[in-house]
């Protein structure tokens, strides 16, 4: 009887020892895994985030002499993606042509005048990287027009005071050095214009005004030179 009790006590002690060993092994594995996980977190925390760049570009300074001024800001969102914000103001698009007409007619009539101003933003995609090589843009802009056409005293002429909201899509190419870049793009836009139009008629003393509500398709193009800032 005493021998049976001793055997049972011995087996119970053995089971306790095995359980203790298993617990120690489990704790050791948990500590090792926990240490590896903590070290991975520490390493991941010290990795610098990918660098992003910003850039500023302007139109060719020669255009400034003609009264056309434009500037674009570029903000890199990812390796191949960027946001471009654009502001531009330029004379009535036909003012150079009207000047040639005035010169040819020895100064009779009045030249086209006024300005257009637009503000827009677009999403840019560069397959080869930010401001490198081929690129596309899809965006939108708001443009105000306050101008009048060439007036020769013989036919009708029109003065516009309108606002345009349009979507724009372009394709282009960018040449980039270390920090300097040059970018050219062309494309098309489609929008809706509203406002007023005044008619100048040499056969009438009145200048009637009518409402403008029209869809406006147009061609788009720009050239920018600028500087890239790393951050």
Image (cartoon, grey):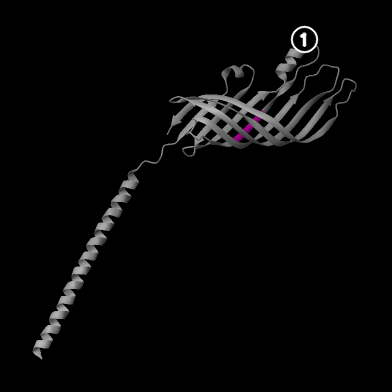
Task: Decide if residue 184 is on the left or right side of residue 152.
Answer: left
Q: Position of residue 217 (x, y in %)?
A: 71, 33
Q: Position of residue 84 (x, y in %)?
A: 55, 34
In the depicted view, which residue is nearer to us: 139 or 109?
A: 139
Q: Residue at x 83, y 33 (%)?
A: 210
* Location of residue 62 with respect to 82 vertically, above or below: above
Task: Decide if residue 99 is on the left or right side of residue 14.
Answer: right
In the image, the segment drawn in magenta is 117-121
Q: Position of residue 148 (x, y in %)?
A: 76, 23
The answer to if 1 sits in the magenta stretch is: no
Task: Report the residue marked by disc 1.
Answer: 104
Q: Position of residue 201 (x, y in %)?
A: 86, 22
**Which residue is the extreme one toward the top?**
106
Q: In which quadrant is the C terminus drawn?
A: top left
Q: Quadrant of residue 71?
A: top right
Task: Decide if residue 217 is on the left or right side of residue 125.
Answer: right
The answer to if 120 sits in the magenta stretch is: yes
User: Secondary structure beneath disc 1?
Assistant: helix
């Amino acid at each position: 009887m005493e021998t049976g009790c001793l055997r049972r006590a011995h087996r119970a002690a053995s089971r306790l020892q095995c359980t203790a060993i298993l617990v120690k092994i489990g704790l050791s594995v948990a500590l090792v895994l926990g240490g590896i996980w903590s070290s991975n977190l520490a390493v991941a925390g010290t990795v610098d985030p990918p660098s992003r760049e910003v850039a500023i570009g302007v139109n060719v300074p020669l255009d400034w002499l003609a009264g056309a001024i434009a500037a674009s800001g570029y903000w890199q969102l990812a390796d191949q993606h960027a946001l471009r914000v654009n502001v531009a103001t330029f004379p009535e698009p036909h003012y150079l042509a009207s000047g040639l007409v005035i010169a040819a007619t020895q100064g009779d009539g009045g030249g086209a005048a006024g300005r257009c101003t637009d503000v827009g933003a677009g999403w840019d995609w560069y397959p080869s990287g930010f401001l490198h090589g081929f690129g596309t843009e899809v965006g939108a802009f708001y443009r105000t027009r306050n101008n009048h056409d060439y007036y020769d005293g013989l036919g009708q002429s029109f003065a516009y005071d309108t606002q345009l909201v349009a979507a724009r899509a372009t394709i282009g190419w960018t040449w980039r050095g270390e920090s300097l870049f040059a970018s050219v793009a062309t494309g098309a836009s489609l929008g809706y214009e509203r406002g007023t139009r005044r008619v100048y008629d040499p056969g009438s003393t009145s200048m009637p005004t009518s409402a403008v509500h029209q869809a406006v398709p147009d061609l788009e193009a720009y050239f920018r030179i600028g500087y890239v800032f790393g951050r």
